[in-house]
Image (cartoon, rainbow, N blue to C red):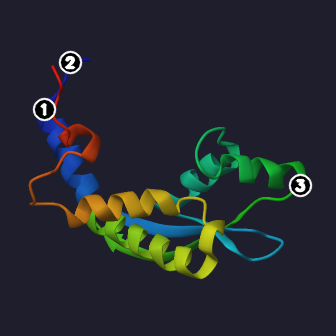
Amino acid sequence: MPFNQKQFDRDIRRWLNEAHYIYTLSDPETGVIRYVGCTTSPATRESMHRSSRKGSAAAWVRALRDKGLFPVFTIIDSARGAESGRSKEIKWILYYAGLNGSQLLNQAHAKNNFRIRMNRGKKPRPSKQFRQPINA
């Protein structure tokens, strides 16, 4: 099927205005929250986490599955639109990272995104290793 720009634009606008749900995955034995995410389809995303082989939570979910357990999936917030959803996701990751310390599996993701968002509108600077003069 050929690319349809109008359909693509409609799909993007719909996705940008769709409801986004912020959720947690917590340990069923301890209740400790180990992962915070954002999705437009909670049931599908929960299923994906249960069967995932890659990602920050996959090894933890596999270890639970080996014991006959699954993480507890809980919706904690919602937002209208992708940008608002991602912002809330990062807010919640940073919040739970402060409570749980290193037990949150995706806190590095949030800290990196937070830095990127804080630098919007500013001229990017290369890291130190690229600022060194080149010796010919």
- The residue sitting at 42% across, 62% down in the picture is 110
Identify the secondary structure beneath mark 1. helix
Q: Amino acid at mark 2?
A: Pro
Among all residues in the image, which is located at the extreme front?
135
Which image quadrant is residue 68 in? bottom right
- Mark 2–mark 1 distance (CA, rounded to whole Å): 10 Å
For discs 3 and 1, the disc positioned in front in the rendered view: 3
Name the spot of residue 92 as percent of width and height, x first.
46, 75
Circle 2 crowding by C-alpha within 10 Å: few under 14, some 14–19, many from 20: few
Name the spot of residue 67 as percent of width and height, x first.
90, 54
Name the spot of residue 131 as percent of width and height, x first.
18, 42
Tell me: residue 104, above or below residue 50.
below
Circle 3 crowding by C-alpha within 10 Å: few under 14, some 14–19, many from 20: few
Q: Amino acid at mark 1?
A: Gln
Q: Judge by depth and name the residue closer to the eye, 39 or 135.
A: 135
Tell me: residue 22, above or below residue 60.
below
For discs 3 and 2, the disc positioned in front in the rendered view: 3
Name the spot of residue 75 as percent of width and height, x first.
54, 73
The residue under label 2 is 2
The label on residue 68 is 3
The label on residue 112 is none
The residue under label 1 is 5
